Amino acid sequence: MIKFERFVLDNGLRVIVHEDKSTPMAVLDVMFDVGARDEEPFRTGFAHLFEHLMFGGSINIPSYDEVLQMAGGENNAYTTNDLTNYYLQLPLENIETAFWLESDRMLSLAFNENSLEVQRKVVVEEFKEHYINKPYGDVWHKMRELAYKFHPYKWMTIGKEPGHVEKATLEDVQNFFIKHYTPANAIVVVAGNVNLEQVKLLAEKWFGPLPSGKKYARNLSAEPKQTAPAFLELKASVPLDALYKCWHMGSRLDKNYYVTDLITEILGGGASSRLYQKLVKEKQLFSSIQCSHFGSIDPGLLYIDGKLIKGVSLEEAEKAVKEELDYMKNELVNNTELEKVKNKSESLMIFEDISLVNRANSLATYELLGDANLMNEELNKYRAVTVQEIQEECQKIFVDSNCSTLYYRSA
C-alpha cells in the first residue's frame, strides 16, 4: 500500500505528497496532461520537441542542469503519446531548489530562435538515427498508419516526419506552451522524507502565484471498430525477414485491461512464454519473438513481432503464430500457467515500487488517469483475472477483421 495525501492549489495545480522517512532524498515529479495525441496532423513531434526545450533555460534560470547539479540533484524526462513527464531527485535539504526550478520553467521558458534551432536539430537527428537509418526503424510508423485511420495514435511520439519539427516557428512553440504547460494541466508529486505541511508551504510559495491557464479540453477523433484485416509488405536492407501483427484492444481504464496484459505475458513475456517455447525453441521458425501492448490511455494495440530464421517463409511463420492464437481461443489456459504470470506481474510491481522515483511517477500517472489510489488497487485486479476471462478476451481480440499485418522482407 502506497500512502499519499493530495491537495489542489487555487490555480488548479494538483499536488500529491508521498512520505518516505527511510531516505535522505526527495523527488519532485511534474506531469503534464499532453502527449503526441494532442498534436495536429500537420504539426507533429511538438510534445517531444518540448521535452528538449524545457531544459533550455527559463526566465530567471539560464541553465537548469547547472543549478540542479550544484544542489546535488539529477533529472530526466520522457514523452509518450499520452503524457509528458519531468522528474528530478536531490538531497532533502535542497528540496526548495526543486520547487524554484520547476515553477520557474512552468511560468515561462526563455524562448528564442537560437535555442529553438538547437533543439530542432537535436530532434531531427534523433529521428534520422532511430527511425530512418536504423534497420526496422520505420516499422511502427507504418504499423500505426495501418492500424489507425482517425485517432492521432497513428503517428509516433517522435512525429510523422522530420519536416514538421524543422518547420516549427517560435510562435508555434509559444502557443503550444501557453496551451498545455499550465498549472491547470499539470500534476506535481513530491516524495521522500517530506511532510504535508512543508510541501503545502513550498507549493503555495512557488507554484501558487502562477496563472492557472485553461484546462485543456481534449476532443479527439475516436477510432471506429476495424472491420477488415489490413496488410502491408515492405522490403529493405535488414538482416532478417520480420513479422509484425497487431490487434486493437481496450483502453487503460477498460475493465479487461488486466486480462489483456496477462495474455501478452502468457504469449510472449520472455523465454518461458508460449510463443518463445513453441516457435523459437521447438519449431525453430523465429530467432526471437515477443508479445506486448502499448498500455495507452485511449484504446490501444496489442502486438506480436518476431525475426525469422533464414529460410523460413513469412507465410509459414504467420501460420504458426495463428495456430498458437487459435489454441488460446479454443483451450483454457491452466491455472498454474495463469498463476505464474500473475506472480511475475506482482513481482515487477513490487520491484518498481522500491524506487522512490518510480513511486512518484506512478502516483502522477494514476492521478492523470483519474485517481492516484488506482495504484493501490491494481494488484487485486490482476489477482482476480480468471482462465475463462483470458479465453473470452482472446476470442474477442484475436479475430482476422481486427488484425493488421506487416511483412518486412530482407532485400
Image (cartoon, helix red, strand yellow):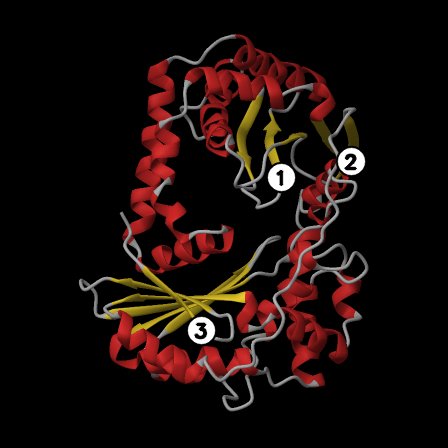
Query: Which of the two marks, 1 or 2, is nearer to us in this view?
Result: 1
Could you tell whether 169 is left or right of 82 in the image?
A: right
- In percent of width and height, residue 204 lies at 40, 80
Viewer-nearest of labels 1 and 3?
Answer: 3
Residue that badge 3 annotates = 9
Residue 344 picture quarter:
top left
Count neighbours of disc 1 (C-alpha within 10 A) and say few if under 14, some if 14 to 19, many if 20 or more: some
Q: Secondary structure at mark 3?
A: loop
**Residue drawn 37% across the image and 55% down it:** 358
Q: Answer yes or no: is residue 133 visible.
A: no
345 or 4: which is nearer to us? Answer: 4
Q: Are marks 1 and 2 in contact (CB under 8 Å)?
A: no
User: Farthest residue toward the top?
Assistant: 331
Q: Disc 1 to disc 3, how far (Cα)?
A: 32 Å
Instruction: Work out how far the residue at label 3 is from the one at label 2, CA to CA, in angstroms.
Output: 54 Å
Picture quarter containing residue 148?
Answer: top right
Element under disc 2:
strand
Could you tell me how far apart the alpha carbons at marks 1 and 2 are, in whole angstroms?
30 Å
x 65%, y 84%: residue: 111
Q: Amino acid at mark 3?
A: Leu
Amino acid type at mark 2: Lys
Give the labeled residue for mark 2.
235
